[in-house]
Image (cartoon, rainbow, N blue to C red):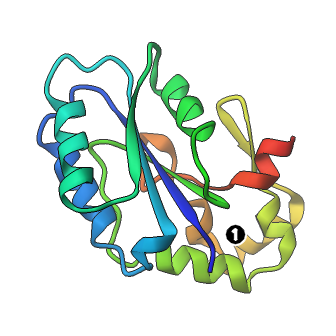
Amino acid sequence: MTKISVVVSIRDCGERIIEALESISAQTYPRDNVETIVVDHGSTDMSPALARRFLARHGMRGSVLPIDGDIWAAFDAGWHQVDGQWVQFLKGQDLLAPTHLEVLAKAISEADETVQALAPVGNAFMQTEMQARYVQQGLVAEVFCSSFRRTLGRWVPHSTAKAQ
């Protein structure tokens, strides 16, 4: 089964980080195959402590990493810490639907390998012509999710993207 890492960027999220982590903890995808990396990029509140406590109390695999920088630096730092084959990016105030990781993992396993070539380039994400066609046809629209502004996160193959 595919191992998935969820990178959560936080900055002064307060109690909302608990809701975000609850949405990860409540996934229908097997917990043994989910890793959560919380990256704090400058919180002045209790968000990092709340995240650490939540991960420990709920037996979730993962860690809380402090960094200096913006949200993109946080996602990048988390990217370099993950062990998963696929990475789900999430902002600390956002939530995942309970079946989110399961649906995406299933779509990826059923999709053609060309869909799995999604790779980050700076702050943009590139798609091949074949991927665009899949999205246009609605075959794997959830794989690409919405933008970071209104996000359920980005779903990215870790090994493929890291190699580029």
Give the position of the N terminus as an image quadrant: bottom right
**Residue 85 or 20: which is nearer the viewer?**
85
Q: Residue furthest top?
A: 68
Residue 118 lies in quadrant: bottom right
Image spot of residue 63 (x, y percent)? 39, 42
**Residue at which label 1 appears:** 135
- Residue drawn at point x = 71 percent, y = 29 percent: 122
**Residue 97 or 146: which is nearer the viewer?**
97
Whether residue 138 is visible here, answered yes or no, is no
**Residue 53 or 20: which is nearer the viewer?**
53
Image spot of residue 32 (x, y percent)? 45, 72
Under circle 1, the secondary element is: helix
- Residue drawn at point x = 37 percent, y = 81 percent: 28
Residue 46 lies in quadrant: top left
Image spot of residue 52 (x, y percent)? 25, 41
- Residue drawn at point x = 18 percent, y = 56 percent: 57
Image spot of residue 114 (x, y percent)? 86, 68
Above or below residue 90? Residue 2 is below
- Give the amino acid type for the residue marked by disc 1 in the picture: Val
